[in-house]
Amino acid sequence: MPIGILRLGAHLPPTVVDNAAVASWSGTTEQWIDERTGIRERRYADPGVATSDLALAASLDLLGEDRTAWPDIDAVLVATSTPDQPQPSTAAVLQHKLGLPSGGFAFDVNAVCSGFLFGLTVAEGLLAHRLKGKAALVVAADMYSRIMNREDRRTVSLFGDGAGAALFGPVPEGFGLHASRIVTDGELSSLVRVPAGGTVRPLDPEAYAAGDHLFRMDGRRVRDYVVTTLPKLVQEVLDEAELTLKDIDRVVFHQANTRLLEHCTGMLGLDPARVPLTAPRYGNTGAASIPVTLHDSHLRQPLLRGERILLAGVGGGMTAGAAVLTWY
């Protein structure tokens, strides 16, 4: 039986950080941020809030407050590159916060901004072959505000915090996930990184003083990877699904930044009306950006049964993913 998305949920922190604030931190101008990124504002979590708290809020948005109406959830996957702590997994923490019974399993997926696409691919495989007839909760949550170098205008202007959730389970024939493709090019792993905090570079006073606990990105080379890898992956997943871009009703990209999304939309010859955007309002929310944008698009224009959706994005690693599904 095919596997598809049964429900969606999302959560964005209430605190809005506009370009005036980012410009004051980084010594740039609001005009520079708008021209280079197309991002007007982003959301930051309040002090004391953890990534698992964002994931919990998105999950509750999906599941609702009435626990008696919740489906049986046998697996919890959290896609994040900003976990609560190195161990245990943020998924284990989320499972506990949701009060889910023991006996299921929970684990994290770290493919940086491609995390949701990796997570849905893993969930589909589990549900199709190991957990037949059951459901999996895939939550993508990131809190980049905690790892930003506020003096680096190239990165601090881009990122915000958020979480998106999707419940996966069996759907009738002809619906659900038709194809997915995920890839990793590890030789490019240095392009997006947080150097310290692991076994290679412990987070000692020297590393902290050097700022090695903060996020770094080679933006130019990342952009080059996006514009060469994304179209190829999109074509491959469409070929596998035996579809073309003309068959797709909505295209939800990872919200890297508005200008890059505009470029990719034009490069693929897509009608911008079919490409929903949240980057101008929420910035780049990491792994959360695809489910957050799909949920936002659904709220603005409800997904109809039979709509075909393409999801695609690129993340650190370097990683990339794409998936095609029909909405049930």
Image (cartoon, rainbow, N blue to C red):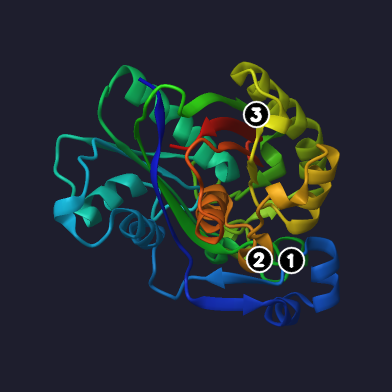
Q: Count neighbours of disc 3 (C-alpha within 10 A) and say few if under 14, some if 14 to 19, many if 20 or more.
A: few
Left or right for 151, reference 4: right
Residue holding disc 1: 152
Residue 123, percent across and down? 39, 31
What residue lies at 55% left-to-right and 46% top-to-bottom? 201
Which of the image's four quarters has the C terminus?
top left
Residue holding disc 3: 186
Q: Residue furthest front?
A: 305
Contact, mark 2 vs mark 1 (Cβ under 8 Å): yes
Left or right for 164, reference 111: left
Contact, mark 2 vs mark 3 (Cβ under 8 Å): no
Depth order, front residue of 7/49: 7
- Quarter of the figure with residue 134: top left
Residue type at the position of mark 3: Gly
Give the structural element (helix, strand or loop) at label 1: loop
Residue 205 visible in the current orientation: no
Left or right for 180, reference 135: right
Residue 149's disc is 2
Q: Earlier in the sequence, mark 3 or mark 1?
A: 1
Residue 276, percent across and down? 65, 53
